[in-house]
Amino acid sequence: FLLNVTSVGANNDSVSLQQVISGKQRSSEHKARDKYRHPQQTLEFFEVRENMTVVEIWPGEGWYTEILAPFLRNKGKLYTAHFSPDSKQSYYKKGVENFVKKLHKQPRVFDKVDLTVLQPTDLMAIAPAESADRVLTFRNVHNWMKNDQAYLVFKAMYNALKPGGILGVVEHRNNSLKSQDVNAESGYLSEDYVIALARNVGFEFLGKSEINSNSKDTKDYPEGVWTLPPTLALGDKSRNKYLEIGESDRMTIKFIKPANSLFIGNNLSH
């Protein structure tokens, strides 16, 4: 389904990424995480420009949507591929309900956002086929691996991109010499594994960056990556220790859909 929030006003003025990131539409709590998530450098690395069609995968409660929506509002297009509102799992249903409420609270920011569905158990088109210049996913791949859905999602992202379009991936990064748990129970993935997942559906590796690296992250915690902030799964136990480490060490990788590629169909089995 597509949801278009009622438009309130519009203009054709350009807005810089820096202006958007420092804008009032973002909460102070979200801005406080910029030192770990580096939104400007990350989006510049993914070569996101204001006149592009962008798909944000599983936007959660909208941390990056607060940046992408106003940046793309006047000259580009933003699809947010969220959970299905018809999901039988309360976590998914509540997540998308809260996201829709967020969109309605600031219509002058989010009025042109199109909400689509990415629920791998009932996969639908996340955007019109070969319409997107960029598809972006932030710390989601481990969730798809947990349920053996990574192939389906990478295929959906591939199909949404134009030939020559770029897929940008940020994910918790495991130690390169550690064998990969196929269910990613710790939340950490190796770069090589993510690169293989993308190549498996036809993407070509384009480059990677250390923008979101964190050398303090030892990746060996009782509750996996969720031991670290912002989740702090152990509560007050060793809280200061984990706050000192900060958020996880993250890979930042981009892939390209080859210019001579073809849409690979709607058969979502493998």
Image: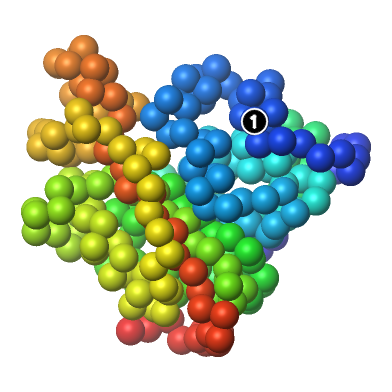
Q: Position of residue 88 (x, y in %)?
A: 43, 56
The residue nearer to you, when weighing 48 against 77, is 48
Q: Secondary structure at mark 1?
A: helix
Name the image colouring.
Answer: rainbow
Left or right: residue 237 versus residue 245 is left
Q: Residues within 10 Å of mark 1 (few under 14, many from 20)?
A: few
Residue for point 73% across, 31% down: 106
Residue for point 75% across, 54% down: 51
Left or right: residue 217 versus residue 152 is left
Amino acid bearing label 1: Gln
Q: Is any part of residue 117 visible from this angle?
A: no
Left or right: residue 30 versus residue 250 is right
Residue for point 47% across, 56% down: 168
* Image quarter in which the N terminus is found: bottom right
Q: Is any part of residue 53 visible from this angle?
A: yes
Q: Position of residue 94 (x, y in %)?
A: 49, 42
* Image quarter in which the C terminus is found: bottom left
Q: Position of residue 133 (x, y in %)?
A: 63, 64
Write down the residue under mark 1: 18
Residue for point 14% across, 59% down: 180
